[in-house]
Amino acid sequence: MFRMWMTLALVCGYASACFAGNLVPNPGFETADQCPSQVDVVTGQVHYASPWEAAGNSPDYFHACGAASVDVPSNAFGTQCGVEYVCGSPYPGAYAGIATYFEQSEDLREYIQVPLTHSLSGGVEYRIRFWVSLADLSDYGIDGLGAVVTNGAVVPGNGVIQLAPQVESTPGSPITDMQNWVKVEGKFFADGGEDHLVLGVFRADNELTIQSMGGQPHKYAYYYIDGVAVATADITDILPGPPGEGGDHSIDVVNAPANSPAYLYCSTNLDGSEINGHPFDLGAPTLMAQTTTDASGYARFTWTGDTPCTGRNGDAVWLEARFDDPASGESSDSGELLWDATTDVRRTVPQVGVVLAPNTPNPFNPSTEISFELATPTNAVLKVYDMRGRVVRTLVTGRFGAGLQTVLWDGTRDDGTAVSSGVYAYQLQAEGRSWTRRMTLLK
């Protein structure tokens, strides 16, 4: 049985890329004017994710449609899926990448910038949120990752941009997580007229807390960036995110206010959204389910079988989620299509026809089983990679029938020699796409 999940969160990405009222266009970098082709050290290719642009040196662009060095999830800097995606899904996502500290080049920086959909209003409080993940091959992690809104675009340069960020990661706490996405967020009051957002590190090297990652090959701090959002601070938001558990389908509300009513609607119209507590227009919605978030602000809706909205007079019925904040009296909604009931297709991830399962056991020694499931007969290739992107072992290649396939990897290379302890990626290629997961060998 194939499963499909959706998770709703306060920001785009584990939180996905856009929350209601988000002023950042293309916040998850999924829209590509052109697929990235290489790590371009001269200009970078983040401008392929229009309207994003470089604001310093050569920031990179990673997309599931990209060439090997700029692919998602595996690329020249490591392995990571987009913040709202899951490795193993047909579309592992997209993100930008910037080098923020160089061992050999003092105060050298990369920045990215984007025009907002409209300028900020003076005296209004806004919230900035974005997600970062340290690339696997980075030998350093740092603090000071920040965001600043500006009047007009920044002229690209090589050094530190002399601006004071409105939002910055915790001083003295380098971000060193290579497995997960780390949220950076904060609030500020706008002066008025700010119409661009710039992301990067706005402090000099001697003002940073720098942590060595133990001899990784890239002698700099390189971060993936995804799920960027700017919105008024009094609106809390819900959006699709990584997969959950339970049932054939599920939708999670995470990080909402504790003990808040949460609702799931079927709707034929998502026009309008909640602003400062005023109701939004759900287009004569039908309440599908109601629950209450727990003390941590978490709730889950699950169902088995057909999409619950199917069959409402043949309309293109959409799934919509909302929760209420008892403290402020405000409501928040996902503000976008979550599920088109006429096609039973999720907004960003189509129905899964291939499943690459987690290996078992993991961590492992000396061997582990890797399973994948095909919906129809097709050609498939399963390979193991090291964290530098080099092929370690080709486990299977050929045409397979529909159903479950299981392969044993004994921790050896193609030439029969044993690999060392460490993290490895295994990738399945089938139906013109690829799915990747990680595993750890401990000796």
Image (tube, rainbow, N blue to C red):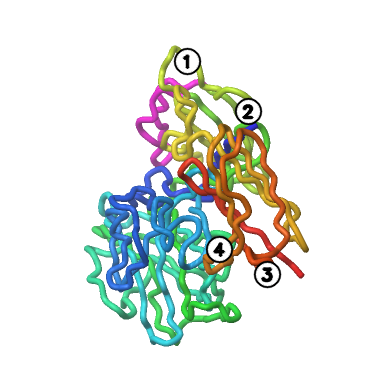
The residue to which callout 4 is attached is 391
Q: Which residues are magenta?
A: 267-286
Q: Is residue 128 visible?
A: no
Q: Residue at x 49, y 63 (%)?
A: 132
Q: Which quadrant holds residue 39?
A: bottom left
The location of residue 176, given as percent across then percent down, is: 57, 71
User: Residue 152 sits in which quadrant?
Assistant: bottom left
Q: Are marks 4 and 2 in contact (CB under 8 Å)?
A: no
Q: Amino acid at mark 1?
A: Arg
| Pointers 3 and 1 in contact (C-beta within 8 Å) | no
Taking depth in this image into account, of 380 and 59 the one nearest to the observer is: 380
Q: Which residue is found at the position 68% from the left and 50% from the top?
A: 370
Q: CA distance from mark 2 to mark 3?
A: 43 Å
The earlier-in-sequence mark between 2 and 1 is 2
User: Circle 1 sits on which residue?
Assistant: 312
Residue 94 is situated, as x and y percent measured from the top left of the image, at 43, 53
Q: Which mark is residue 303?
A: 2
Residue, disc 3: 419
Quadrant of the drawing holding the N terminus: top right
Question: Along the polypeptide, which appears first: circle 2 or circle 3?
Answer: 2
Q: Up-down: is 215 above or below 133?
A: below
Q: Amino acid at mark 2?
A: Trp
Query: Where 443 sits versus 195, above or below?
Result: below
Q: Secondary structure at mark 4?
A: strand
In the rendered structure, which disc, 1 or 4, sits on the residue that comes first in sequence? 1
- Of 9 and 55, the residue lying toward us: 55
Name the mark nearer the viewer: 2 or 3: 3
> How would you rate the neighbour count of disc 3 (Cα within 10 Å): few for under 14, some for 14-19, many for 20 or more?
some
For mark 3, give the secondary structure.
Answer: loop
Quadrant showing the C terminus: bottom right
Residue drawn at x 43%, y 84% as measured from the top left: 205
